[in-house]
Amino acid sequence: MKNIFATRYGIIGVGAVIGVLAPLLQKLGNPGNMGICVACFERDIAGGVGFHRASVVQYIRPEIIGFVLGSLIAAYLFKEFRPRLGSAPVVRFVLGVFAMIGALVFLGCPWRAALRLAGGDGNAVLGIAGLIFGIWIGTLFLKKGYNLGRTQTTGRTAGLMMPLMMAGLLALLISFPQVAGQNKSGILFYSVKGPGSMHAPLVIALIIGLAVGFLAQRSRFCTMGAFRDFILFRHAHLLSGVVALIAAAFATNLIFGQFHPGFEKQPIAHTMHFWNFAGMTLAGLAFALAGGCPGRQLFLAGEGDGDAAVFVIGMVVGAGFAHNFGLASSPEGIGIYGIEAVITGMIVCLFIGFTMRRKHI
Amino acid sequence: MSAKIDARGLSCPQPVLMTLHAIKTEKADEIEILTDTETSKENVVRSAARQGWSVIDILEEEGNFRVKIRKK
């Protein structure tokens, strides 16, 4: 059976649907230009379970749970659930850590960069430029034979680990629901102010997350692959999905009155142009070396890819480091050790890029 | 002349890189690419078509896809 979602019209349609749903989530309560942000939401989940104690960013985001479970459902329905792992998982963990740190210096993953642009945030231009630059560096490594090695087929249990973890998070969210005005409910942390306190209703966020996960699994939507494939092969297939997302989000923001052009006072954003660029350069390189944007890693984890699951865990741990060590930015600017973190991350990613070669696997 | 590529277990964009490399460097008129995911199969088919090669056969066997492409 032909997969209509993997056609040109399919990927454009999926991009456009995500471009409508994300601003809708913002309208329903998610933070500004953050209808969907995979990095921010995984960071909020890290806070929700107490891996960091930044009180303004603690909430178990149902969208992330939906992304993984929606992908799992699609993969099962279309017989694409393939449990696999073993392609340098510890390297992928480290890449996940620094991808998150880079994203939190910019204040958003590629998904949010696109949504920030569609919401009028000029600083997103620097972030997207940095993202493309980082991915371009990654393509140079790919051309030189960079490779993390082959996966092995594994048992169903291993492939189900990340979906089960997500189901576990959902169980915690239901068992310890948010109590208005309280920063804790049972074992979970809940922000009472700041972006972590802003969220769409749980059920709606979960349903939209499931829909996006389903569609993205079918279409292979990837914000990093979009630029990588265009740079490497001049293939605009995935890129057309990202462009459709931005166009649809822009139109939806106009309708909802959520389009506010400018650089200053943008929601959850800072104006340190170089560090917006450099943070996303680090994230872009890490995503390129790991073979997928943070969303794609969730969708792959949903279809049984244990290495993508390890990358996701790396991002959650990276969020812990980012907030515990003062690496993450805030609207006031970059964190105390943000510069050192970006430099360290670039050195680590370049080391991985130079040393993981085909001849060694 | 035909060439074979084993891209099983390799994630994006490796199967496509290997296919395009073979199209450019091998003197083969036919290339057979073995992949183990639907995504890699789709990407390989799409890339080959863009290079002006035609897909002559896709066989699914034991969870793998054997994609045969031929120079037009």
Image (cartoon, helix red, strand yellow):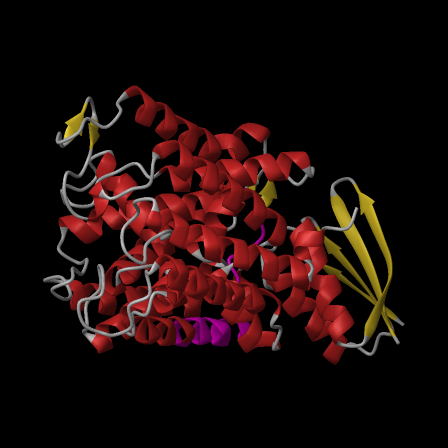
Q: Position of residue A28 (x, y in %)?
A: 34, 44
Q: Is residue B34 left or right of residue A283?
A: right
Name the image quarter holding residue A166. top left
Quarter containing the C terminus of chain B = bottom right
The one nearer the camera, B16 or A186, is: A186
Give above or below for A58 relative to A123.
above
Please name the residue shown 57% across and 55% down the image: A14
Magenta region: A133-151
Q: Position of residue A273 (x, y in %)?
A: 23, 77
Answer whether residue A221 is visible to the viewer in this image. Answer: no
Q: Is residue A237 left or right of residue A355?
A: right
The one nearer the camera, A306 or A293, is: A293
Quarter containing the N terminus of chain B = bottom right
Whether A161 is among the magenta residues is: no
Give above or below for A280 relative to B66.
below
The one nearer the camera, A24 or B15, is: A24
Q: Position of residue A239 (x, y in %)?
A: 55, 68
